[in-house]
Image (cartoon, rainbow, N blue to C red):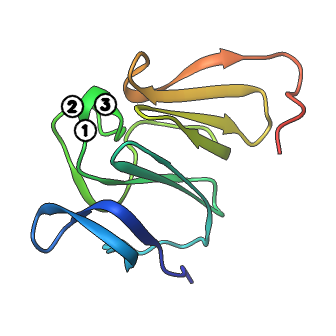
Amino acid sequence: MVTNLYQWGIIYDSQSQKRIKCHVPTKTTINQRLEGNLEQVTCGTNFTVVLDSNHRVYVVDDEPKYGRLGQGDDKTIVPTLTLIKGRLPSIGFISSGPSTTILLTTDKRELWGFGKGIGYLPKQILQSKQTTSNVH
């Protein structure tokens, strides 16, 4: 059901276990079976975050600094598309900066995040009693 995910630029090559520079799109390894389609992709410094149609969040790459890979520490690399760790509500939108990822819930009432300044695991950073608008 999942289509392919391609990366280019400086990426982590899981076969050579090194960073490589790709000038053309390169297919990313997906080791686990994804039941939904890939809906949204966002990138930070040396990492890629993906949202699927079942509202789950995945990450891939080799730069765990500041917990930006959402794996609970700053040491674990994820050379293949991997679910971020921790218990999350249903996510509807993702956005990344150089070292941080922000997640908006499907009801648009909560912001969650992980990475520099937030932590190694996703956590709620804002809750609203009103539905957030102006998010596309």
Q: Are marks 1 and 2 in contact (CB under 8 Å)?
A: yes
Looking at the rendered structure, the kind of residue marked 2 is Asp
| Left/right of residue 36 with respect to residue 65 in the rendered view | right
The residue identified by callout 3 is: 67
The residue identified by callout 1 is: 64
Q: Where does the image place residue 14, in percent across and percent down from the top left? A: 18, 68
Query: Circle 3: is it few (<14), some (14-19), or many (20+) Cα within 10 Å?
Result: many
Identify whether 46 is placed above or below 40.
above
On the rendered image, what quadrant is the N terminus found in? bottom right
Identify whether 65 is placed above or below 118.
below
Q: Secondary structure at mark 3?
A: helix
Q: Quadrant of residue 23?
A: bottom left
On the rendered image, what quadrant is the C terminus found in? top right
Give the mark, 1 or 2, whose residue is nearer the N terminus. Answer: 1
Q: Secondary structure at mark 2?
A: loop
Residue at the far front in the pictured view: 23
Looking at the rendered structure, the kind of residue marked 1 is Pro
Q: Are marks 3 and 2 in contact (CB under 8 Å)?
A: yes
Residue shown at the point (54%, 81%) measured from the top left: 3
The residue identified by callout 2 is: 74
Q: Are marks 3 and 1 in contact (CB under 8 Å)?
A: yes
Residue shown at the point (41%, 68%) measured from the top left: 7
Q: Quadrant of residue 95?
A: top right
